[in-house]
Amino acid sequence: MTRTVADIESFITLLQVACENKDNAILERLLSQPDARRRGLVHEWVSDLLIKPAPKDFIEVVVCLGDDAIAEKGYEAIFQCRRECQRPFATGRT
């Protein structure tokens, strides 16, 4: 059976942490790169993670970021979180 990105719990956790963390500039910068540039950076990152070695589930998450559609959705999710965090709180006063 083929796994989807939604099946990789660490990917969902990464997006949640990026949404909650105002200091998510590195991930946002990676995801905003042109596709070919982002794929190259992800490939280099994965190579580094395999050499170190890093936890397998984290490597799976980084590999997902090499997929154009996944990267676009990830960027949209982070951008949406940032917009929601910047909205002023409703006070209920008129």
Image (cartoon, grey):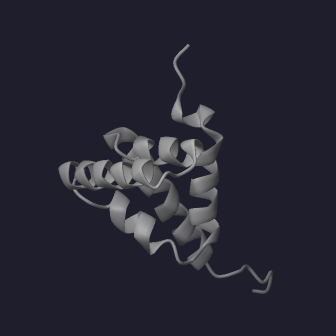
Q: Is residue 72 above or below residue 87?
A: above
Q: Quadrant of residue 18?
A: bottom right
Left or right position of 51 against 34? right
Left or right position of 70 against 87? left
On the image, the x and y values in percent for residue 27 come to 44, 64
Residue ID at (60%, 37%): 8
Nearest the viewer among 69 and 13 is 13
Total numbered circles: 0
Q: Is residue 48 above or below residue 94?
A: above
Q: Is residue 3 above or below residue 13?
A: above
Furthest residue to the right?
92
Furthest residue to the top?
1
On the image, the x and y values in percent for residue 21 come to 60, 72
Residue ID at (63%, 58%): 16
**Considering the image in quadrants, where does the C terminus appear?**
bottom right
Nearest the viewer among 55 and 78 is 55
Q: Quadrant of residue 31?
A: bottom left
Left or right position of 61 against 87? left
Residue ID at (34%, 49%): 47
**Considering the image in quadrants, where does the N terminus appear?**
top right
Residue ID at (53%, 28%): 4
